[in-house]
Image (tube, rainbow, N blue to C red):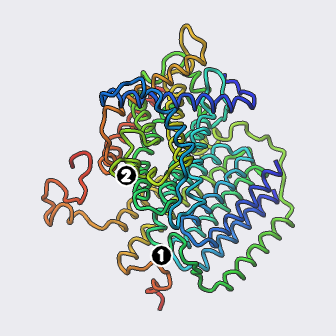
Amino acid sequence: MAETTAWWGALVLLAVLLVLAFAVAAFDAVLAARAAGRPTRTAAVEPVRTVAGLLVQQRRRTVAADSLLWRSAGLVLLVAGVLASAVTPLGRWAVSDLDVGIVWFNAMEIVAWAAVWLAGWGPNAAFSLVGGYRFVAQGLAYELPHMFALTTVAIGAGSLRVADVVAAQQGLWFVVWMPVAFVVYLVSVLAMSFTRPFDQATGSDLAGGTASELSGVDRLVHQAGQKVLLVSGAAMAVPLFLGGGAGPLLPDWLWSVVKTAAVLAVLTYAGRRTPTIRMDRFMEVAWMVLIPATLLQALFVSIVVI
Amino acid sequence: MTGYLLLASALFSVGLFGALSQQSIVMIMMGLELMINAVIVGGAAFWYYTAPERPDGQVVIVVAITAMAVEMAAGFAVTTAIFRARDVDMTDLAADLKD
Amino acid sequence: MDVVFWGCAVGAVASGIAVFRVDSMARATFALLASFVFAAVTVLLVDLTYLGVLVILMMIMEMVIMVVFMLMYMMNPAGLMPMSMLHNKKGALVISGATFAVLATGSILVDWPTTNARRPEDPTMALGEALMGPKMLTMVVLGLALFATIIATVVLATHRGRYDRYGDRLDRKRPDDPVRGGLGR
């Protein structure tokens, strides 16, 4: 049911992802300014100022850094976010309609694990190493519930292809009868892109964690990669749980964008209201509460499908 | 088909060299992982070119992937235990059963 | 297709050799990851999309966890001094060279059977149905093996047992852990 775009569809995808990432950064800055009592009009253009400043800032070199691994880490993060969206349909159009689209999405966000760890290891600095290790611990915690949530979606649709998942939601959206999987998926999107409240990897108690030794273009690529990964995960929630491009009045691609923006707004707002969650505590909650919950959800969906 | 089997043999030989010559337990495990990688490539080649209508080749690949995971987990657990007991990770010094 | 295959083949073998040549443990692990990704791309080229993507997924996760352990145990993690941790290098080279010669000769000279059977258009579904049907024994054995591995590795690696955590008579209400978990246990 999904149509594959021409080769320039990839450029459109990149543009959409960057615009949404920018919007998320602006919304986050506005919320922070409102919480701090600062005027919000100047906060809304803060991402533009940040990008401009980082582009002209000098890059940093550290002693005995592993340059090859360090400089490539941010780029790998950004590429992972973009590739993960290669199977996400915008309405009816997808850059690639892989027949194992869900597994591909999962594989590309795992690349983010490697990228953040490399960003932590590369500069040969203590704080960034600790940040990288914190992210690996967070990854181990959220990954199994995330995989079970994706498996539940695949069971409900009977296929691993994202177009089939969208087609299977024509009667009832998956979010209605798989709410646990939806909530777990949203939590894991926040965790995979180390956004608040799961940003212990770049937390302020570590002087910035994995981002502590980055400056200039490296820092810009790292932060852009983080935001693009968040947008990519939220964009995938739309065809997986919220019915793709279905909706009454607007064209389907516009509905996809609107739903993605809504999911991003909810995630950013929830992140702003919650303090940073410590990984050792989250690990126990993830393994003892979230995994049985997702397994029960998968059992329920399997019984319904059969 | 020949190309795939050549790739599998090359990966297997590189892994064998690593598994035989390395001193550190974790490097030996890397060699073993390369050998199982060769098994995966060989299994895929045999499935595609010899019997694609049967699922047996794919099952072999699934078993090989599981074997890789099991081997890595068990290897690191054993290394942890040895390291706690003796504070080394060299296989030369773990030759207690050799008598 | 052939160009892609031979490129990936050369890349896989080259990064496999690089695993044992580089000095830094982090680079060795990621060289192994590169070798796995190249081999998985060759698996993708024979229409095994699910298994190829699965190998990429699992190997990235495994290598990230492995690099944590490699740095823990290996005394030259950052490559600050060149090291050559080999014993019996010549013997190993001879054995692996001979193995490669024998296997390569076999692969080139043997007349492999070809088939005219129809290739399935959904190998993933065929695999799933096989594992849940005629090959259910494989699935059960794999499940048991993984379960046994989980238990065995935890037993081998854990530093503190039940009696350390709950007291000599297992009578403490809360376990005596250095870091309390999130559920208040």
- Image location (x, y in percent) of residue C58: 55, 52
Residue at coordinates 57% horizontally, 23% vertically from top-left?
A: A166
Q: Nearer the viewer, residue C58 or C125?
A: C58
Q: Nearer the viewer, residue A156 or A203?
A: A203
- Image location (x, y in percent) of residue C20: 62, 72
The answer to whether residue B93 is left or right of residue B2 is left
- Image location (x, y in percent) of residue A197: 36, 39
Specify the amino acid type for callout 2: Ala
Q: Nearer the viewer, residue C2 or A268?
A: A268
- Above/below status of C86 relative to A289: below
Q: Quadrant of the N terminus of chain A?
A: top right
Visible in this render: residue C62?
no
Residue that lies at the very extreme toward the top in this rendered image: A249
The answer to whether residue C146 is left or right of residue A160 is left
Look at the numbered disc 1 and give the secondary structure of its residue: loop
- Above/below status of A153 relative to B15: above
Residue at coordinates 56% horizontally, 30% vertically from top-left?
A: A158
Crowding near the residue tagged with mark 2, few <14, some 14–19, many ≥20 C-alpha atoms within 10 Å? some
Q: Which residue is mark 2?
A: A207
Specify the amino acid type for callout 1: Met
Q: Which residue is mark 1?
A: C75
Q: Nearer the viewer, residue B90 or A90?
A: A90
Crowding near the residue tagged with mark 1, few <14, some 14–19, many ≥20 C-alpha atoms within 10 Å? some
Look at the numbered disc 2 and give the secondary structure of its residue: loop
